[in-house]
Image (cartoon, rainbow, N blue to C red):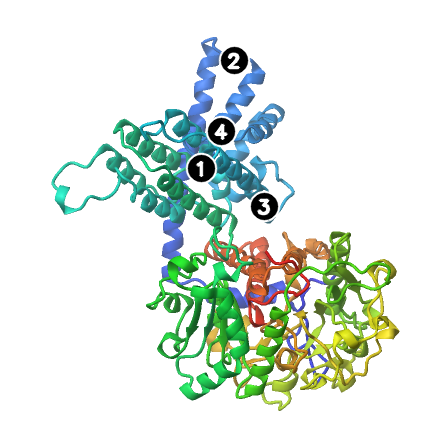
């Protein structure tokens, strides 16, 4: 296995990689160049001093613990040895995780076992890791995750957090749980103590040791604000400004002073102080208001800890009447053009307005996208009142969750789409001046929406599947080509295997095309079936061309099939599928008029990998994509930026133009604009699509490169699973956005803490994170983000 980083793109004129595969060292060298300036050095020094001061207090506490036990031993007050191990383990975890925290029993058992086996080595290692500031490594070791990476540790802790939080809410914050107040509306002692004990047991301090987790600061502000609206805690204004604040107000003010550096138990203790003060003041409470304040805090805490994105929990993204729908035009778009496009899109707009009701919005003219807008400035501009960092809450902020951008990347940049897409479900339409294409797409979506989304029943005794329930996985493995070998074996095949097992007993039928049969002819057969598949996932090379090549606009991102033999030289037209293969009109007969013999066999009749059945030999001039969602893993499959994204962020002076202007790829546009039989949406990639999307990271030094054989396809599988579950495509893409957010957080943490010079492990990790972060943010939806598979069950 090579130690180079690969991506799925090949130059159509030369047959060579558009960007040669590069080593991690080469990529890291670009990232690290000119990194350290005086300001960053000062900030690093300040952070290091704060960290060391905090850890020195913990080391001092550990020394005091050992000295106290030694004195007890000399005075004859030594506890039984088994008890000592558990008591010492519990005390150590309290010191490490903060103050009076109550460690989970399982964590105490793990550390007690270590103390029993190697007491001196255990204490020594804890102190050494504290002294060197390696909190994440210490957390892995303490919580018995020696061989796991940070992602595994994070998922384990998040799972424990989620389970404990669900139990807490059910017991203390829902009807039917423990009674909150007595007959006079005064808080009950049992409820206060039980709630605070349950809160203390959440593993928040354990999570705080991981890179990039701030599980305190943001949610705390939500808690203080929510409590401040309650009777007895509300700011009573200038009328009583001269009087001393009440005990509950003092307790709330003390809680407001806490910050992200405080231990979790201290936050819980502060909340307990507020609740006890309310009880002592005999303040009657409206239970619903207090429950709402605490639930809002815990919802924000969960989002902070687990990285949940999208809508607030009380908005169902499957229901457009709750999530809302908006269309955004460039503010500088001429009014006559804007009106003409809206008229062409009228069938779609009518459907969405009926579905979204009062949460339907059209942002055009001065309310549209303005040049230079970020997601934050756009969302905050009146009458909008939203925050780019917060989940979508349409009824509160007046900004719908589903947002369709209309215009080219020159008019509404991809960077704006990336930013907005983190918390919102965003799609894009760009047919330029082609009003007929806008009209065709609107009619395609409206006809599928009007036809209903009831789940189909499996056919009985016919030997055929129900219409529109096939899920097709397609990926060539070109001769002598590493990139497509990796994507075929470690992305397409695992996904097909996963969904074969997952869809047993459901209407969904999974077809995996053998890589050697993943030819252009077979792909066109799939796209020409009278009964089209519901979903196509294709992983191929995407063609790319130099910015001065006149073929770039029409062919960049075209799908290279198995017909290409990996040799240098211009790729023949017969080896790839491009927009030219998509007719502007579809001559395919209506489904009801097509003999059932043309359908794809049921999964049981299809081998592990398969060719497209010969009965589906439809002429290549026809195409039927009605109701389909297409997922393209290919370089430039969705679009091309003007400048190479893998250089510009740190090296603007060295950024290389790769196109005269940014543009949406021609193939997905042609697929959406196909009259009467166009697709609903295409998921694709802007810029190069790297193998880092699905291959394991480099855990350490170069000799560990063999680990790259281990794939991780969870993000792709999660997106597809949500689509099959009836989620609109924009909601399903939240998993991609979470991956981008998680990588950006880890990259920032590593980048800020790099030593000078950086270690070999950090260099390799930085190189992969840098590429993976840029790769993850590049997946977008071309089309309406609120469309869903017709055969999937709605909410």
Residue 376, horizontal then vertical, whole percent: 39, 65
The mark nearer the N terminus, 4 or 3, is 4
Mark nearest the camera among 4 and 3 is 3
| Residue at (36, 50) in percent of width and height | 46
Residue that carries the numbered disc 2 in the rendered image: 79
Q: Please tell me whether mark 2 sits on a helix, a strand or a loop.
A: loop
> Residue 769: where, in percent of width, then height?
57, 60
Element under label 4? helix
User: Element at badge 3?
Assistant: helix
Which residue is painted at 56% across and 71% down in the image? 784
Please report contact status of discs 2 and 3: CB closer than 8 Å, yes or no: no
What secondary structure is found at the residue carrying circle 1?
Answer: loop
- Determine the CA span between mark 1 and mark 2: 41 Å
Q: Nearer the viewer, mark 3 or mark 1?
A: 1
Quote the CA–CA distance across marks 4 and 1: 32 Å
The residue wearing badge 1 is 173
Q: Which of the two discs, 3 and 1, labels the residue nearer the N terminus?
A: 3
> On the image, numbered disc 4 is attached to which residue?
92
In which image quadrant can residue 664 be found? bottom right
Q: Give the vertical position of 558 relative to 549 (above or below).
A: above
Say few, some or many: other residues with alpha carbon within 10 Å of mark 1 (under 14 / 14 to 19 / 20 or more). Answer: many
Nearest to the observer: residue 405 or residue 175:
175
Q: Residues within 10 Å of mark 2 (few under 14, many from 20)?
A: few
Indicate which disc residue 155 carries.
3
x and y percentages locating residue 700 in the rendered image: 63, 52
Front-lying residue, 629 or 599: 599
**Distance in Å between CA atoms under marks 4 and 3:** 24 Å
């Amino acid at each position: 296995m090579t130690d180079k980083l690969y991506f799925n793109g090949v130059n159509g004129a030369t047959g060579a990689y558009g960007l040669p595969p590069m080593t991690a060292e080469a990529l890291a060298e670009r990232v690290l160049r000119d990194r350290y300036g005086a300001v960053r050095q000062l900030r690093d020094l300040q952070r290091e001093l704060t960290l060391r001061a905090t850890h020195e207090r913990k080391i001092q506490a550990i020394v005091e613990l050992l000295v106290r036990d030694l004195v007890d031993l000399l005075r004859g007050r030594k506890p039984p040895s088994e008890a000592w191990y558990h008591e010492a383990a519990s005390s150590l975890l309290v010191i490490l995780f903060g103050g009076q925290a109550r460690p989970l029993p399982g964590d105490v058992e793990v550390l007690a076992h270590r103390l029993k086996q190697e007491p001196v080595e255990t204490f020594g290692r804890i102190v050494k890791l504290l002294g060197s500031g390696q909190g994440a490594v210490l957390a892995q070791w303490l919580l018995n995750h020696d061989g796991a990476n940070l992602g595994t540790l994070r998922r384990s802790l998040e799972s424990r957090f989620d389970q404990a939080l669900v139990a807490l809410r059910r017991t203390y914050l829902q009807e039917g749980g423990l009674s909150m107040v007595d007959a006079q509306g005064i808080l009950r002692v049992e409820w206060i103590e039980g709630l605070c004990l349950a809160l203390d047991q959440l593993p928040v301090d354990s999570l705080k040791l991981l890179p990039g987790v701030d599980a305190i600061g943001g949610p705390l502000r939500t808690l203080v604000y929510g409590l401040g609206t309650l009777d007895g805690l509300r700011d009573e204004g200038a009328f009583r400004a001269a009087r001393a604040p009440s005990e509950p107000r003092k307790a709330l003010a003390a809680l407001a002073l806490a910050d992200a550096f405080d231990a979790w138990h201290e936050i819980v203790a502060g909340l307990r102080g507020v609740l006890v003060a309310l009880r002592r003041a005999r303040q009657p409470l409206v239970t619903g208001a207090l429950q709402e304040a605490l639930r809002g805090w815990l919802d924000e805490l969960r989002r902070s800890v687990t990285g949940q994105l999208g809508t607030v929990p009380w908005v169902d993204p499957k229901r457009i009447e709750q999530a809302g729908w908006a269309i955004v035009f460039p503010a500088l778009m001429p009014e006559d053009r804007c009106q003409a496009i809206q008229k062409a899109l009228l069938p779609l707009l009518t459907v969405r307005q009926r579905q979204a009701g009062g949460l339907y919005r059209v942002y055009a003219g001065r309310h549209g996208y303005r040049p230079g807008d970020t997601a934050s400035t756009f969302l905050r501009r009146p009458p909008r009142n939203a925050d780019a960092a917060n989940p979508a809450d349409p009824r509160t902020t007046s900004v719908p969750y589903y947002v369709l951008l209309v215009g080219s990347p020159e008019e509404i940049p991809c960077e704006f789409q990336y930013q907005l897409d983190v918390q919102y479900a965003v799609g894009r339409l760009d047919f330029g001046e082609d009003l007929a294409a806008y009209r065709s797409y609107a009619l395609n979506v409206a006809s599928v929406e009007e036809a209903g989304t009831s789940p189909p029943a499996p056919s009985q005794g016919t030997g055929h599947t129900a219409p529109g329930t096939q899920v097709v996985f397609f990926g060539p493995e070109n001769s002598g080509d590493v990139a497509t070998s990796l994507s075929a074996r470690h992305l397409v095949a695992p996904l097909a295997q996963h969904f074969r097992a997952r869809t047993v007993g459901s209407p969904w039928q999974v077809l995996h095309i053998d890589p050697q049969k993943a030819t252009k002819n077979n792909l066109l057969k799939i796209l020409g079936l009278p009964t089209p598949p519901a979903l196509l996932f294709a992983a191929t090379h995407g063609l790319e061309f130099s910015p001065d090549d006149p073929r770039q606009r029409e062919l960049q991102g075209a799908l290279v099939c198995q017909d290409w033999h990996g040799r240098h030289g211009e790729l023949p037209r017969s080896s790839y599928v491009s927009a030219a293969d998509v007719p502007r009109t579809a001559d395919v007969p209506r489904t009801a008029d097509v003999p059932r013999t043309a359908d794809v066999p049921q999964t049981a009749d299809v081998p592990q990998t398969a060719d497209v059945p010969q009965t589906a030999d439809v002429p290549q001039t026809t195409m039927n994509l009605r109701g389909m969602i297409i997922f393209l893993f290919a370089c430039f499959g969705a679009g091309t930026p003007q400048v190479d994204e893998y250089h510009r962020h740190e090296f603007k002076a060295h950024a290389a133009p790769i196109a005269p202007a940014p543009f949406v790829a021609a193939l997905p546009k042609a697929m959406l604009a196909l009259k009467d039989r166009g697709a609903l949406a295409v998921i694709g990639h802007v810029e190069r699509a790297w193998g880092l999307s699905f291959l394991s990271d480099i855990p350490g030094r170069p000799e560990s490169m063999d680990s790259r054989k281990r794939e991780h396809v969870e993000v792709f599988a999660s997106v597809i699973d949500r689509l099959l579950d009836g989620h609109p495509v924009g909601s399903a893409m939240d998993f991609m956005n979470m991956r981008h957010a998680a990588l950006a957080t880890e990259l920032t943490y590593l980048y800020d803490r790099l030593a000078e010079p950086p270690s070999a492990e950090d260099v390799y990790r930085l190189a992969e994170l840098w590429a993976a972060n840029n790769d993850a943010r590049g997946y977008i939806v071309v089309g309406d983000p609120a469309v869903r598979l017709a055969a999937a069950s709605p909410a």
